[in-house]
Image (cartoon, grey):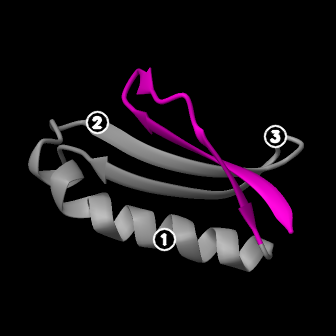
Amino acid sequence: MAHFSLQVTQGKFSNAGIEAVFESREAARKEAISICAALARDIIVDMPLDSEWRMEVADEAGKPVFKFRILAETV
C-alpha cells in the first residue's frame, strides 16, 4: 500500500489536501480521474474566464506524480 496526497487548487485558492492510501500508483491515478470527472461539471459552470483548476497527486515524499488541469482561457 502506498500513501498519496491529493491537492486541489483553483486560482490562488488551495485546499488543505487529502491524504489517502492506495494499492498502487495506478490506483491513485484512477481515483484522481474519478474525482475530476465527478467535479468537472460543477467546476466548469462556475469557472471564470482566464482561470485554472488543478488537482495534483503526490507520493508520500511530496513529489508530484500526476497533475490534472482544467483551463478556461480567452483566445
Which residue is at 19% across, 48% downward? 75
User: Mark 3 Cα within 10 Å, few/some/many (few <14, many 20+)?
Assistant: few
Nearer to me, 31 or 47: 31
Few, some or many C-alpha atoms within 10 Å of disc 2 (few <14, some 14-19, many ≥20)? some
Residue at the image position 24 percent from the left and 36 percent from the top = 50
Q: Are marks 3 and 1 in contact (CB under 8 Å)?
A: no
Q: CA distance from mark 3 to mark 1?
A: 19 Å
Q: Earlier in the sequence, mark 3 or mark 2?
A: 2
Q: Amino acid at mark 1?
A: Ile
Mark 2 sits on what residue?
A: 51
Q: Residue at x 26, y 61 (%)?
A: 40
Q: For the residue labelled by badge 1, is the local secondary structure a helix, a strand or a loop? A: helix
* Horizontal relation, residue 43 to residue 26: left or right: left
For the residues labelled 1 and 2, the Cα–Cα distance comes to: 20 Å
Residue annotated with mark 3: 62
Whether 8 is drawn above or below 58: the answer is above
- On residue 33, the disc is 1
Residue 43 forms part of the magenta stretch: no
Tell me the crowding category of disc 1: few under 14, some 14 to 19, or many 20 or more residues within 10 angstroms, Cα based: some
Q: Is residue 35 above or below residue 8?
A: below
Q: Amino acid at mark 3?
A: Gly
Which secondary structure lies at badge 2? strand
Q: Amino acid at mark 2?
A: Ser
Start-end of magenta stretch: 1-22
